[in-house]
Amino acid sequence: MTSGSPEQIWRYLDGEMSADEESQFQEWLRASSDNAREFAQITLLHDRLRTEHLLDAVVSSAAHESAATAVVVRRRSRPLAFLGSLAAAGAVLLLLWLGIGRTTVSAASELDRLLRAQSQGPDKTYEITVERVAAPSPRHTERDQEHRPPKPSIDGALLHIRQGNQFVLVRQLPNGQQFLTGCNGQVSWAIRPEGPVRVSQDLSRFNRDVPGHEQGMPLFDVEHDLEQLRTAYDVQLLPVENGDDAASEQEPTRLIVAVKKRGYRGPQRVEIAYAVRSGRIHQWRFVDMPYGPERLTLRLTLTDEAHLGPAFFDHATHHAPDRTIAEE
């Protein structure tokens, strides 16, 4: 099967290629304009199908102002039509590589602007969606099962974040109960439905369940992640979406696509969808993100942006006062 066969193009768009296959495929994309046209035609079809699926699956939510103080309420993300085209980023990125559709704003300056916007914003809540899981090798699986229990699923989890490496990760166990881990910038903690609340002065003690921590790109530290893109990734800025639509109530949006350089750790590709004027990041997408023995393709979709209160990231906010505290 050749690198540019329709089957391979669909595998690339669905994130089913290994790192080596993806590298070879990108070389094929850059080889000629004929390859670009073939890729673009299939990408348009793929994008249209994905957009229709997302629009059917996602229910529109109204803008909200009140702070979220309970972690049991799960908000659905507001639909953004352009998010359906995230998988088509490779096609536009290819056109940029070929010198077509260049923008006057540099990717570096936009990263700087996004950094400033994140440092000034309120607390944020993201919903994590796992699109794909690349299974580990059988040998790796056996070794992992011998030394650690399985993690609760990250799919559907809520991640609340605040500046200063503060976060609360809320995951659902199979029985419907919640398992919380977090950090308030002074101590890290973990709360299972039963047993003591575990607390540690080591701020990294309980961040292992947040994707990206193994690669120095933890999802709760947005500013650090943006800095990492500047250093370890080739970053491209794509054209503004719905920028000329004066009737649209949505702020014009833009997509940044970053492909990892050789020799660096982290996911193979990162996509950031954000509002042009405010710099508000609506969605992150990570392709081939290491997570324990697995490699994930996952999305973080912004569901809320509000001040959660001074004590929200303290463990005591999330458990009964009579729970036993075990310091580690």
Image (cartoon, helix red, strand yellow):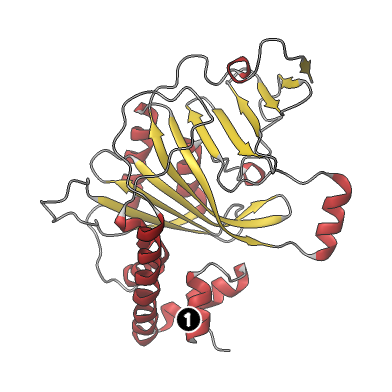
Residue 97 location (% of width, % of height): 36, 70
Q: Quadrant of the C terminus?
A: top right
Residue 320 location (% of width, % of height): 66, 15
Q: Residue at x 45, y 43 (%)?
A: 226
Q: Is residue 294 above or below residue 310?
A: below
* Front residue of 97 and 67: 67
The answer to which quarter of the image holds residue 186 is: top right
**Circle 1 residues within 10 Å: few <14, some 14–19, many ≥20:** some
Q: Is residue 220 visible?
A: no
Q: Secondary structure at mark 1?
A: helix
Query: Residue furthest toward the top?
Result: 322
At label 1, which amino acid type do we have?
A: Trp
* Front residue of 216 and 146: 146
Q: Residue at x 32, y 68 (%)?
A: 96
Residue on which disc 1 sits = 28
Residue 126 location (% of width, % of height): 47, 39
Query: Residue furthest toward the right?
Result: 146
The answer to which quarter of the image holds residue 264 is: bottom right
Say left or right for 193 vs 283: right
Q: Residue at x 83, y 44 (%)?
A: 148
Q: Is residue 198 visible?
A: yes
Total of numbered circles in the picture?
1
Q: Is residue 180 above or below residue 30?
A: above
